[in-house]
Image (spheres, coloured by chain):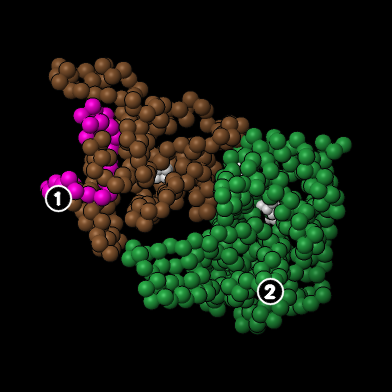
Amino acid sequence: MKKVKVAFFDFTCCEGCQLQVANMGEMLLDVLDLIEVVEFREVMSEKSNDYDVAIVEGSITTSHAVERIKKIRKTAKVLIAYGSCAAIGGINGMKNNFKLKEIREYVYQKDAKHFDTIPTHAVHQVVPVDYTVPGCPVYIPEFIQVLKAALSGLPYNVPDNAVCVECKLNENECMFDKGVTCLGPITRAGCNSWCINNGNICYGCRGMVSNPAENGQKDILEKHKISLEWIENKMNMYNKSRELGELK
Amino acid sequence: MGKYVTLKKSDFNEFIEKLSKIKPVVAPVAKGKKSFAFAEVTTGEEVALQYIPTILPPKKYFMPQKEKILEFDKKKQDWTPILEYSEKIIFGVHTCDLAGIQSLNIVFTTKPKDINYIVRKDKLVIIGLECNNYCDEHASCAVMDNHLPNGGYDLFFTELKNSFMIHVNTQIGDEIIKRIKLFQEAKKQDFQQLDDLRAAKRKIFKDEVKVGHEGLKNLFDKSVKSKVWKDIDSRCVACGNCTNVCPTCYCFDVKDDINLDFNTGARYRVWDSCQNENFAKVAGGESFREDRGSRQLHRFMRKFSYPVEKFSRYFCTGCGRCSRTCMAQINLKETINALVKEKK
Ligand code: SF4
Ligand code: SF4
Ligand code: SF4
Ligand code: SF4
Ligand code: SF4
């Protein structure tokens, strides 16, 4: 099989998700049999304008970034939003809690006017995205699944049920039974309840389930005695960008 | 009446130790204050003798969540069927879960027979454990007639004052008793204690809902148009927890997983749920059961009506897991009572 040319790009993010690739271990060798990495700032200095698959990390937070992602979209046959910053805006979305002008002055102080900034957008809010790998950081088994889907042209849908489902299948003691609040009930599964398996709560990093059973969600919050306000605060940590529509 | 022996409580730890030398032993272990799971043990101290139904039922040993059934190599045109099994002794299965295993056995040994299941089941030794009292408020094992032992085990333990009374039900069970030389013959006073315990249980365990065992099927058959399903429709979030944890839900999906060489791979059988949005979808995207209320109705009919017609038994064991686990507090006992109330 001819190797597929893959380029990694980063926008506003911590590059932690790219680092996950390095953590893949042996699996990485199998992946490298399939793909040729033509650009990957984290590990190499080459740049390329010739690639089939663009793996995009980070959220779009400047008008310069808007232009850059549009160019990438034009070149790439397949675009993968990689990690929560790209998939849902992620942590960077917290910026959207503030007035743009104020936050810019707070961060850059007297040089603020030299720094252009726009509200934090997820990649799909700016250009069409073919595949999404949410997670902060991404969960490698899911990334492999997405990669296989992308290379064979099959669709991949991020699960739309709650992390609790995986958590039950892993037979974890529920955090709520330990008196700790956990965002599993309203967060999209797909990470195999990674954090809870390791003794932490779910922080909601994969974004919210899109569940239409409104009364059900109310019952869930009630069962776990979670206040709506608390949820909003916590969920905003990763999901603030969700309130924006597509960038016009 | 069969054969009965006793085991001193002080010998229990040694019993589990010796048992685990025969074959790997799995038993309920505490995962937290209110959570238990079947897991491997090698000493008696690890076993939670007082436990409420485990998060997942022992079904996980009979039909694993993810079972490899085939390995393939496309280039070589090679398709090798795989049969996954392992020898185990499952200790401490409550009567509700014994009924669950019996239900699965019926399903998978009725034509078309499921060879993988049958082979796996024959490698599993089952040791039951009686509930002397209710596990919690979600149980409805009395109305389902599963609060007393009713077969389906090799050995069955009942905790008496200073000892366990053990019913030896199969030859496999008898061999274990003979190999582990810790048992005494049951005496008259042991039988007396067992009788007293069962008599006391008859006073504690009463129909937990406002309809009797016989009336349940009719109640559900007449409920199809009930408003109760509308209410459930607005609350169920279709997560599938209730079917995953149910000891008698056996729906599965078959998935191929290709390796990164895009040539070799394996076919897996994985648990599926009738509550998932995609489950009732057929080719063309049409869904037979679009709304959650009708999917829940389907779940209940699969417990209280259809299997009665097909296998002459209810497929609800009364274990209460679905109520304990439901994200939206949809509760089996409340649902039944709401249907009874509406009918009046
Ligand atoms: S609330 Fe958290 S700990 Fe509890 S089941 Fe859900 S994901 Fe697991
Ligand atoms: S458990 Fe929650 S916070 Fe952890 S990886 Fe999964 S979605 Fe993210
Ligand atoms: S329907 Fe609920 S109570 Fe009945 S067997 Fe299934 S999980 Fe247990
Ligand atoms: S439902 Fe009944 S049989 Fe099952 S654990 Fe509870 S009390 Fe025991
Ligand atoms: S557990 Fe509750 S919310 Fe989830 S599918 Fe079952 S009834 Fe619906």
Q: Which residues are magenta?
A: A41-68
- Write down the quadrant of residue B235 in the picture: top right
Between the residue at mark 1 and the residue at mark 2, the CA separation in whole angstroms equals 63 Å
Picture quarter with the N terminus of chain B: bottom right
Residue position marked by numbered label 1 in the rendering: A44
Colour of chain B in the image: green
Question: Does residue A90 appear in this view?
Answer: no
Query: Label 1 neighbourhood size at 10 Å, few (<14), some (14-19), many (20+)?
Result: few
Lateral position of residue A164 relative to residue A5, left or right: right
Marks 1, 2: nearer the viewer: 1
- Residue farthest left in this picture: A45
- Residue B311 placed where, x, y %? 77, 64
Name the foreground residue: B222 vs A202. B222
The colour assigned to chain A within the rendered structure: brown
Residue B63 at x, y = what percent?
58, 65
Residue identifier under label 2: B154
